Image: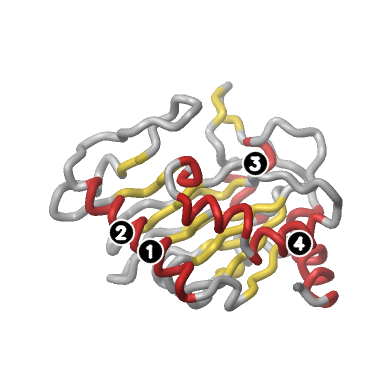
Amino acid sequence: MLQHAQIEQFHRDGFLVVENVMPPETLKALRVQLEAWVEESRAYTHAYGETIDGRARFDLDPVDHHVDHPALRRVSSPTEISKAYFDTALKSDMAHMAGQLIGASGTRFHHSKINAKLPHTATTVKWHQDFPFTPHTNDDMITALLMVGDVTAENGPLQVIPGSHQGEIFDHWQDGQFTGKVEASIEAEHCQNYVSCTGPAGSVCFMHTRLLHASGANQTQLPRYLFI
């Protein structure tokens, strides 16, 4: 499904954006479900719901969220409660492409989430690598980020440092606490020449687990929805 040149590009840069991966009818089903969750979130003031392993399922921005300005920023494990999201994660062209990039038999699904940035919300993600979050010794892991809506340079796109997956795994601890981000000195030295991963709805960004990445706030009226 992916061309050889695309696979080579992924291994060289640590990421690959592919457009038109998901058909319109699938995107519509995902969008309708997500927008229903956004509407539901208006009735809450704190994180709510519960995943199978006991985490809050729906996470709200503690500053931006209120009934007239919802700021639902994450849905954990939507595959547990939505057939549309389950099928997309395990049975779609996105899943097959991820298997191609990993290049090994027996590809396994690890977990899923939705990261949302609703219009004019301040939610950001600091510079980090995904690998320190996962209890694995091998790094043949790929994050697939499906753009459920259009992603532009202004509505909080994923920002990546090409080739950084071939470097070291940086410390994500400060003062004895796991903060999930790299030190300010690492950010200053390694995270300035980034590339923004944008695309129309239905695009997928495939990202190596060691790649340095972050994202800024949504400064527009256009929501940014990523199914990861």
Q: Is residue 171 left or right of residue 150?
A: right
First in sequence, mark 2 or 4: give its number. 2
Q: How packed is label 2: few (under 14 Cα within 10 Å), some, or many (20 or more)?
A: few
The numbered dot on residue 87 is none
Residue on which disc 4 sits: 163
Mark 4 secondary-structure assignment: loop
Amino acid at the residue labelled 3: His
Image point (74%, 61%), residue name = 14
The reply to whether the C-beta atoms of the residues labelled 1 and 2 are less than 8 Å apart is yes
First in sequence, mark 2 or 3: give its number. 2
Which callout, 2 or 4, points to the residue nearer the camera?
A: 2
The numbered dot on residue 31 is 1
Q: How packed is label 4: few (under 14 Cα within 10 Å), some, or many (20 or more)?
A: some
Q: CA distance from mark 1 to mark 2?
A: 6 Å
First in sequence, mark 4 or 1: give its number. 1
Amino acid at the residue labelled 4: Gly
- Nearer-the-camera pick, 127 or 207: 207
Residue on which disc 2 sits: 35
Q: CA distance from mark 4 to mark 1?
A: 32 Å
Q: Can you say whether 71 is above or below 20 in the image?
A: above
Residue on which disc 3 sits: 110
